[in-house]
Amino acid sequence: MTPAAPSATPSAVPAFDRSHTDDLIAYLQSSPSPFHAVAEAAARLEKAGFRQVEETAAWDAAFGGRYLIRGGALIAWYVPEGATPATGFRIVGAHTDSPNLRVKPIPDTGTDGWRQVAVEIYGGVPLNTWLDRDLGLSGRLALRDGSVVLVRIDEALLRVPQLAIHLDRSVNDALTLDRQRHLTPIWGLGDVHEGSLISYVAAAAGVTAADVVGWDLMVHDVQPPSYLGRDRELLAAPRLDNLLSVHAGTAALAAAAAGGTLDHIAVLAAFDHEENGSESDTGAQGPLLGNVLDRSVFARGGTLEDRARALAGTICLSSDMGHAVHPNYSERHEPGHHPMPNGGPILKVNVNNRYATNATGRAVFAAACEKAGVPWQSFVSNNSVPCGTTIGPITAARLGIATVDCGVAALSMHSARELCGADDPFLLASALKAFLES
Ligand code: ZN
């Protein structure tokens, strides 16, 4: 590649529009946990005219935008005027969870005068990426009266300190981290008292500690996302996998609904628990999405026959992060398929159904990108390197609907801080909008 001419102002943000990525940065900052991610997506959908429905209420046949929240999952849908009970769905699928460290049921621990917090490891965490970072804490508290409050502490509260090189001269040859002993964050000095962490968190949430009877709490890096690179063409941020897709899907759904002329019912399905197998009431293995589609058909007076016709005319675009070619490890990638940041969204293929894409799905994805005027790239694994997977094959198998796996190419996937192209979030959102509108 010919080097670009030196920029007169190397640190300046490029002139073209990065408002979508700026908005993604704000979304990531607002969403340290899946519970915050769905609350923030819901707030954006409310602004776009969507209204929340309760799963326990009877649903009406109204046209327009609706959404529901269950824990860390959100399903939103827009029924256009003129939709019949047999109208098919266009679904954008994504997930709200990211690998991290989560607080154990009896959190207060410590030794040698240090206060520490006992944590479990959630999902496929590259453990070293959590060392020596300033960590905040977030999640939800369940109260004695049955209510749930979200809590977010965005300040340097905890840290998993790495052992000094003087005490382990082999660290640069073989860093070994024991998942039980070496990942326990410190959060200060002093005696250990049972209940002190939850008291601290309860105070931050503005509730009485004695009322807190359950919690789903997790740590996050408090360093804000940042543009990176000579021309600021990259984005360094936590939770790009997969809040980048949730954010893009939310923006695409709101824009498609505002456009007005849809032939399908446009849906965003943002699941929790993808990172540990999707097997939960809020994960893609559960009945949540299927229930919403069924109830949507039945609310409009549909029969089982209408439901079967609707699902036969349905396509799901499952969006998740994928691997950009790593310049220091290019031998790990398929030699003929080297996705690059800012090359546009990637189409993910695996013939053994780790991804759900097939020839007809490729055609759907290509048509959406062409309609949106965005470039796209193909991803396939090196045959000698095991391929990851997504909610795509799960959704295809569970609901029997045509599904395509796509996403955005990134480095450092699952790291506490990942890296992608700064233009790709907008390119993905544009393709998702075109898909929902087609
Ligand atoms: Zn993911």
Image (spheres, rainbow, N blue to C red):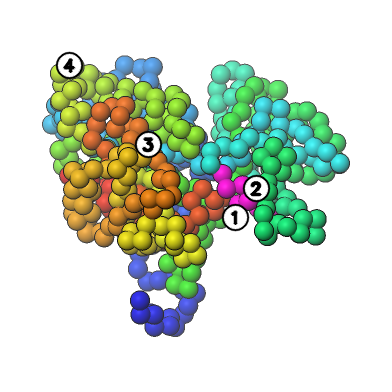
Name the residue beneath numbered marker 2. Answer: 135
- Mark 1 to mark 3 CA distance (whole Å): 29 Å
Secondary structure under badge 3? helix
Hey, what amino acid is under mark 1?
A: Gln
The residue positioned 33% from the left and 53% from the top of the image is 379
Q: Residues within 10 Å of mark 3 (few under 14, many from 20)?
A: many
Q: Quadrant of residue 224?
A: bottom right
Looking at the rendered image, the disc whose residue lies closer to the viewer, 3 or 2, is 3
Badge 2 vs badge 4, beta-carbon distance below 8 Å: no
Hey, what amino acid is under mark 2?
A: Leu
For marks 1 and 3 on the same chain, the one whose residue lies earlier in the sequence:
1
- Mark 1 to mark 2 CA distance (whole Å): 8 Å
Q: Residues within 10 Å of mark 4 (few under 14, many from 20)?
A: some
Magenta stretch contains residue 252? no
Q: Residue furthest front?
A: 384
Name the residue beneath numbered marker 4. Answer: 303
Hey, what amino acid is under mark 3?
A: Ile
Q: Name the foreground residue: 419 vs 213.
A: 419
Q: Which residues are magenta?
A: 125-135
The residue positioned 18% from the left and 43% from the top of the image is 360
Residue 76, can we see it?
A: no
Secondary structure under badge 2? strand
